[in-house]
Amino acid sequence: MYPTTPSAFYQKLTYSLLAIGLIMLAIYLGQDILVPLAMAGLIAVLLRPVEAWLMRLGMPKVVAITLAVLLAVILVSGVGVILSMQLADFTDEWPKLKRNINEFYMDARRWIRREYSVSYRQQAEYLKNAQTKTLENFQGAETLGVVTGPLATLILIPIYAFLLLYYRTMLLHFLVVLFAEKHKPRVLEILGEIKSIIQSYMVGLLLETAVVAVLNSVGLLFLNVQYAMLLGIMAAILNLVPYIGGLVATALAVMVTFISNPDPHTLLGVVGVFIAVQFIDNNFLVPLIVGSKVKINALVSIVGVLVGGALAGLSGMFLSIPVIAMMKVIFDRVDGLKPWGILLGDQTPEQANNNLFRFVNKRKPLKKEVGKDS
């Protein structure tokens, strides 16, 4: 029996790693199809209570789904209008920004000439070469795909969400009959838990984003920073990307503030506002609003965000946390995958009052007794 156990372990590990590699390859190659579909799936689960409420009012299923999706589109469009208004104000200040940029550009050229002995003519040649290469890249055939890709995604997501809501029953029935009859209760339990986690996560995420946007905007308005609402909302949206989004938002806000108001005290105030909001968000808003259903440890979250970004860009970063949460629900309920569920969780065996350490502690004196008997 003993020689077969390591062989079975290595065989199982090989299959697991091979499956992970194939899934990651499929996501990387099919991200243009899978990412919008996954985003639409999250939105569909989020809109399911709205659809159910409209149907209880007596509306037909198609009308209820259409109104729910239309409501989501209107909300997103409203945020886009607010950002567009702020961007319009930003463009009105372009002459002032251009003057500040030119002053910074001249100071940078003088500093480079003084520190590195690079003449103004050499600097101009370097900039001209870089500009030529940039224009060549934008004139390539892939530029059209870069521009039209996000637009096509924005159009596909509402359509996917509508179809997923409309064919929801059929899809759930397919997932149930895909497994043996004896596994039906466990499959239904997993599906119900995944639905609950996604709804809790998405609703909490929307509330958290709104609160963070308000806190950012109020703090920047207190510092009399221009485009405070624009920076506050953009920072809250970037904050949807765990861990990394907050850093990018802070750097962006500092850069924009530096262009319009290069006062060091104001720049330090902007950094202080974002640090304070991040502290409030991480220690109060996330545990209170997002809830405790998404129990994933920080290490797995950071690695998952980076892997998601490498596979599918910014959308992959956003989708990484709910995907890992769904994986944990499945791993916790499948006997052969429970160790992976422990790896993804945020509780150590001591915190979870697990029997693992008690089992280990009980075995130690048994080993001593066996040694004495021998």
Image (cartoon, rainbow, N blue to C red):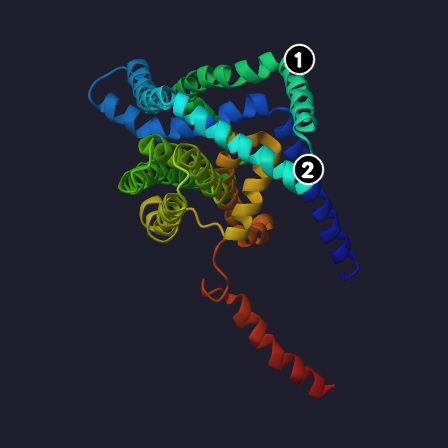
Looking at the image, residue 366 lies above or below residue 145:
below
Question: Which sits in the foreground, 280 or 67?
Answer: 280
Expressed as whole percent of the image width and height from the top left, the position of residue 47 reads 34, 27
Q: Which quadrant is the C terminus positioned in?
A: bottom right
Expressed as whole percent of the image width and height from the top left, the position of residue 11 reads 74, 47
Type of amino acid under label 1: Gly
Question: Which sits in the foreground, 90 or 19?
Answer: 90
Q: Residue furthest bottom?
A: 372
Name the residue: 54% across, 54% down.
Answer: 342
Residue 18's image quarter? top right
Type of amino acid under label 2: Gly
Quick one: SS at disc 2? helix
Q: Residue furthest left?
A: 57
Q: Relative to 324, is 44 on the left or the right? A: left
Q: Residue furthest right?
A: 3
Q: Which mark is residue 76?
A: none
Q: Is residue 123 visible?
A: yes
Q: Which quadrant is the N terminus positioned in?
A: bottom right
Q: Which mark is residue 140?
A: 1
Quick one: SS at disc 1? loop
Q: Are marks 1 and 2 in contact (CB under 8 Å)?
A: no
Of circles 1 and 2, which is in front? 1
Residue identified by numbered label 2: 21
Looking at the image, residue 156 lies above or below residue 225:
above
Earlier sequence position, callout 1 versus callout 2: 2
Label 2 Cα neighbours within 10 Å, binned few <14 / some 14-19 / many ≥20: few
Name the residue: 39% across, 25% down.
Answer: 96
Disc 1 to disc 2, C-alpha distance? 32 Å
Question: Which sits in the foreground, 90 or 147?
Answer: 90
Expressed as whole percent of the image width and height from the top left, the position of residue 297 reads 50, 52
